[in-house]
Structures are given as C-alpha cells and as structure tokens.
Image (cartoon, rainbow, N blue to C red):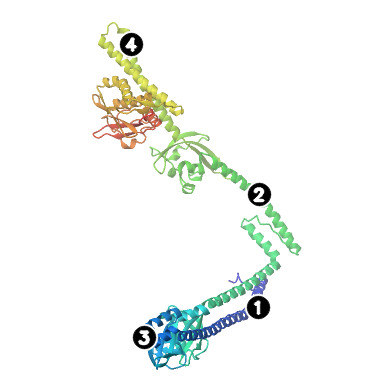
Amino acid sequence: MKKIFDFGKLSTQLILSFFLVVLLAALLVGLPAIWLLQNQLEAQAWAQVNQGEQTAVSLYEKKHVELQNLAILTAQRPTLKTLVERNDLSTLQEYLFTLQRGADVDLINLCQIQSTITGTVPELPVCRDQSEAGYYLDGENPWMIVRRSIDTPAGQGEVVLGLKLDHEFTGEIQDQIGLEHALLIQKRPVSTSLSPQDELIPPLRECLLNSEQQFANVYCDLAGTPYYTTSFPLDENGLNGVVALDISQITIAKTRLILWMSIAMAGVALVGSVLGVFLSRRISRPLVKVSTAAASFSRGDLETPVLTESRVQEINQVAVALDRARIDLLGTLRSLEDERDWSKNLLSSIVEGILTLDADNQITFFSQGAERLTGLLKTDVVGRSIDEIFRLAETNKPFSSTIFTTTGSYQNVDLQLSDQSIVSYAITMAKLTRSGENGFETALVFRDISEEEVLHRLLGRFIASVAHELRTPLTALEASIELLMDQSDELKLEERRELYNSLHLGIINLHTLVDNFLESANIEAHRFRISPRGSDLSKIIGDAVNTMQPLLLKYDQKLTVEIPMDFPKVHADMRRIVQVLVNLISNANKYSPPGDEINLEVTSTTRFARMAVKDRGPGIPPEHHDNLFRRFVFPQTKNEISQAGAGLGLSVVKAIVEAHGGEVGVEDRPGGGSIFWFTLPLASEEI
C-alpha cells in the first residue's frame, strides 16, 4: 500500500487535492438539487391528487343533476300516470323495469305514504326514508337517491330513482378522473376501483383508520404499491369518497434521480481526479518517461521511442542517448528475427522430417515435417531419447545402433510407430557443430518411402505373376508343338487331338491374359469405352461357355446354366460381357475342385438382369470382400491356396460392369464356396 499511495510524492498530493475539492463541490451542488427535485415531484403528485378530488366531486354533482333530470322526466311520463291511475301493479312494474333499462339506473320505485307500491327494487326501503334527495345507505351498500312527486289514486306519491355506488360505479369514476377511486362509510371501504378488491380493500381500510385526520392527504401502502390518497365528504352520515394516485412510477423516478445524480457527482469527481492525474503527470513527465524507457529496455521493449519535452538540458541529453541506443539494438534484433523467421519457414516448408540429437541421443529439435510424417508432436518428443521414440520393426536393436558415422550417409529403415503401424523411411545423417561450443549434434533427415516400397513389392509380384502366367501356357505350347513336329507321323489320332486341345487351352489362357492386360491399360489411361445395345443374354452366355468349355473338360468340371425362357434382352456390349463371364468362370474353374459343378444362375428384376457364378471352392474371408475388385489384389482364400493370375481380372470385371450402369459383388455360398454376381440393365422396348 505504501508504494501505491506514497503521500510524499507531489503527484499523489495533487491527485488527492483535486479529488477532494471536486467531490465537495459536487456534494454542495448535487444534494440541494436532489432535495428540490424530490419536493417538486411530490408537489406535482399531490397537485394531481387534489385535481382528481375536485374532478370527482364535480362528477358526483353531475351524476346527481342527471339523476334529478331523469326523475323529472320519469314522473311526467303519461304512460306512468295512466298505469298509476289504473292501479295495474304488474304492468306498472314491467313498465318500470323497461324504464330502468333505458335510463341506465339501478332503481326506480313508486312510493306512497312511506310504503312501496311497486318498483324494480321493491325490497329496498327507500320509501320509508323521507330525507331529502342525496344518498341512502343500505347497510354497507351506498345509493345515490332522487325523489319526485307524482299523483296516485290514494293521494300524493313519489317516484324514487337510484344509482348503486358499487365497484362498477367507482370504476367509471376512475376511468374519467384517471385516478383510483373508492367509497367509504365511517372510514370503511365499501366499493373501489382498485383491483383485486379482496386484496386491496383491507390494507386501504387499515391505512385510513390509522390516519389522524379524516379529510387529509394520506400516504398508503397497498399490497406493496404506494399511493397518495385524499378523501372528500358526500353526506353527513359518514359517506366519503377517496381518490388515490399510484406513485410507484414517481418512486422509481426519485430512485433514478438519486442514482443519476450520484453517478453525475461520481463522474464529476472522476473527471476532477483525471484532471489531477493529468496535471501531476505533466509536471513530472520528463523524469517519468526517462525512467520508464530505461525499465522497458530491461524488459526487451525496444519499440517505444524515448520522447521528452523537459526544460532541463541534462534530462534531454540522457533521453537522446537512450533513444539512440534503443534504435541500434532494435535494428540488430530485427535482423536476427528475420534470419530466424526465414530459417523457420524454410524448415516448415520442407516435406522431409528433420530432427537433431545431442551427444546422448536426446532429441533437441523436431520439425513440422517430422510431425506430419510420424504423427508425433514436438512437445512430446523433445528432450527424450531417440530410442524411446523410434523403434526398429521386427528387431530388438535400438534405433541409435543404425545411426552411421559418415556425414551424408543414406539408409532405409523400417520403424514401428506408436499406433503399431510399420513405416519405411529413407534417412540421411549429418554432423553439426554449434558455434562457440566444443560439442556436436547429429542431424537426421528422413523421408517416408512406404508407398514406394509397397509399389516395388506390387510391381515385383505383378511381374512374377505375369511371368508365371505366360510361362505355363507357353511351356505347354512348346511341348505340344515339339511333339507334333518330331513325332507327328508316329502319333495316333487321339494323341494328336489331345495335343491340339492342349494348344487350344494355352491359346485361350494367353488370350484371356492379354485381354485383361489391354483392358486394364485402357482403364488406367481413361481410354476404356463400351458400345452397348440390345443384346440376347443367351447368346452372350453361349459364347462364354464355348470359350471356357475346353478348360472345364480338362478338369472334369460341369457348368450348369439356369436362365428363364424368353428372357428379355439386356442393354450391353456383347464382347465385354462375354469377357466378364469368361473371367468369373475362369476363377471358378481355378479354385473349384476337379470334378465339381459350377453354376451360372440368371434372374431379373423390373430394371436389371442379375448373373451369379457359384462355385464350391475354399471361399473368401469377409474382410477381403471390399478390396477384392481392386487391381493386383488376389482372391485370397480361407485355406491360403496358392494364388494364380495377374491380379487384373476382377478389376476389369468391375470396370466393365460399372460402365454398363450395373453393380458387382461377392458373397459366401451356403455350404461352402463363393458367389460372384453382377447386374446389367434390361433393354428398353425401343431398343
């Protein structure tokens, strides 16, 4: 606290002086203003209450005059006099009810000698009350009563008209004066416009009973709502009227007034304090700036210039010297930062991963490229041993044992990552020496060659498969041709036919393999095209069966075809679909046991024909179904039977079928084996 509020400093004394003076002035001006404004609001509120009282008195007088005029008109009605002379009481009562509804009054009674002849409220004893026209109290129900003489068969009578002064009546008065209104009998509220009446009448009664003067201005709190009230007498029997003004908005206005005045005084005090701060800083600014600049230099802030406007020459000289030193340091720092940013951008843009190791094989640097290649974060590996991060696959040797000593050496290694995946990297090593230090660091640059290794293995496997596929039929062809050339005259007809059949099978195999090579090349080069037209599916199946018949006979396999009669034509390229069927039947021939049966089943839906080649081979594991129709993927079986083919047939099948707008798939056959199926669109009637 002492350091923050040092009262011995000139700036602190100036700030406190301005604050106290301004605060005192604000209080001297603001408090009287608040008092005056509050009094003015209250005076206006009471003036509104008194004005409402006068208006209410005038309205009561007006109601009374209107009721008197209505009584005169009622007493002079010829029909009324006629009915009175006839003494027809039932008709007279109906007539009085009709008059009551038309005159908007609550009572019309016909009296004679202090008794009621008939009327709309005959039970009300207004005839026995011979007081002058005014108000009548029926218990706690006040009435406004007017009398008018009329001749009756029994002598002089009276017509009495009345308005019941109930809640509805006080509500009408409230609508006209704009203030709440109530009627009291001996300070007991009997009707009011306040709502809800059940909740507000009791506190109003308690407030008025506690007031010392009967007709004084009284403050009442009704169910949490403040009111200014005043009352006025209506007769000498204790019937009074009350006018009440809801001052909740005035109370809110007072509160807001006090709040805003307080905010204003606080604002004035704040402005004064700010002014004191400004003046104190203006007085001590030169020294403060010099000391602040020196402190900022120690924190590394070289952007803020040292500016002073002191009249003391020595201070200006110190400030100029500090600013020159700041500029020199800033230039040097920016040059170093530019070099650092360039090196950082260069390292981040390099695709290869770069890391450095100290003499203990601890990682000291890990580039963004290294993060991308390994999936590891720099914060997780820096400071840890390289043997903890990089582990050689399929060996327990530490990774550091593969680090060679010759700068620029190159080596391929297989590493096992944290997710147990194995990745191949090409690593180059270099030795680095830090400036001014005796030790050195090892820099490793590594590149992911996993895809290249996979490609090399696929290429080698493909070449081996192609060589095998070509060698087998060529060897058979060579042997058959040699026999025919050397022993043609000695061979029997059946033996020659067998050699010719072997030549035919070899040519079929070569033809299928070459077709798959060509189609795969066309697909890869995006030159693959089809020419679909309305085609007879029976003819397509027949051509495929004729092509495969020699192979089926060689392995004593039977091919059964199930196709409905009068099967509709398909929209297809006949040559391509024959190639599809040959590939699928060929696969079934390779993997089915000798002497077994292969089924070709044809069905249809409303739009497509479905062909399924079913075999009883070893089957294909479900996890290989999704990748089976990709290039260089072989139909690996559950029993790991040796694979045959170049790995192109099924990919060609998929491309041809999808080019026709169909689908292709594989399923497990119940009881063992596989089902290879594909669909073709049916030809429309126009084709």
* Circle 3 residue: 89
Q: Amino acid at mark 1?
A: Ala
Q: Amino acid at mark 4?
A: Glu
- Dot 1 crowding, Cα within 10 Å, few <14, some 14–19, many 20+: few
Nearest-to-viewer mark from 2 and 1: 1
Q: CA distance from mark 1 to mark 3?
A: 85 Å
* Circle 2 residue: 332
Nearest-to-viewer mark from 2 and 3: 3
Element under disc 2: helix
Mark closer to the chain start, 4 or 2: 2
* Circle 1 residue: 25
Q: Amino acid at mark 2?
A: Thr
Q: CA distance from mark 4 to mark 1?
A: 129 Å
Q: CA distance from mark 3 to mark 4?
A: 149 Å
- Dot 2 crowding, Cα within 10 Å, few <14, some 14–19, many 20+: few
Asked if residue 126 lies left or right of residue 179, the reply is left
Residue 644 visible at all: no
Comparing 670 with 88, the one in front is: 88
Query: Cβ–Cβ below 8 Å for labels 2 and 1?
Result: no
Location of residue 101 by image quarter: bottom left
Q: Which mark is residue 482?
A: 4
Element under disc 4: helix
